[in-house]
Amino acid sequence: MKQIVYAVALCLFTLTSFAGNTPAPAGAQVYFLSPQDGGEVTNPVTVRFGLSGMGVAPAGTEKENTGHHHLIIDAELPDVNAPIPSNDNYRHFGGGQTEVSLELAPGQHTLQLLVGDMLHIPHNPPIMSDKITITVK
Ligand SMILES: [Cu+2]
């Protein structure tokens, strides 16, 4: 009997280790305050991040119901079970910033917001905005 309890405990531990994403606070939402989907904008493009149902905290801060913003530019959603890549297409705002001023090439661009936890890993389920399209004149 003891062995069965031990085996079950080990299984549960293994499962929770793999499903390690920080749970998303119920009802948390991330969205663009600006620009608007379909909007025509000029450089510099000010992108303002909206967040409700949770708080913003700098990367590395262990505090429940918080995260920091990531802006995905002209790219797809990354693997939501791994740290979000960091490059020109996946921008981290680990200081707790809630807006950014961008210089974008003229033409169409897509933008999407994705919240990451203290380790830059999306929550479970991931807290992400709709992907919007803007045109830079
Ligand atoms: Cu990050």
Image (cartoon, rainbow, N blue to C red):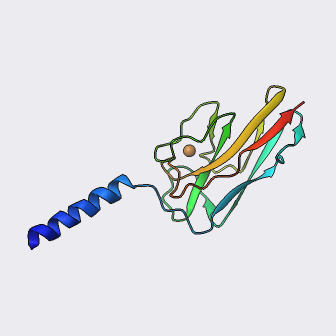
Which residue does the image show at 71% across and 45% down from the upper left? 131
Visible residue check, residue 44: no
Residue pictured at 34% horizontal, 59% vertical: 16
Which residue lies at the image location 21% right of the left edge and 66% below the top edge? 8
Q: Is residue 78 above or below residue 3?
A: above
Looking at the picture, does residue 81 appear above or below residue 41?
below
136 sits left or right of 49 in the view: right
Q: Quadrant of residue 4?
A: bottom left
- Left or right placement of residue 131 versus residue 5 in this view: right
Which residue is outermost to the top?
105
In terms of depth relative to the viewer, which is nearer, 50 or 96?
Answer: 50
Q: Is residue 106 above or below residue 48?
A: above
> To which quarter of the image does residue 31 belong?
bottom right
The answer to which of 57 and 73 lies nearer the viewer is 73
**Rendered residue at 81%/32% (across/down):** 108
Residue 27: x %, y % from top left: 62, 68
Q: Is residue 113 visible?
A: yes
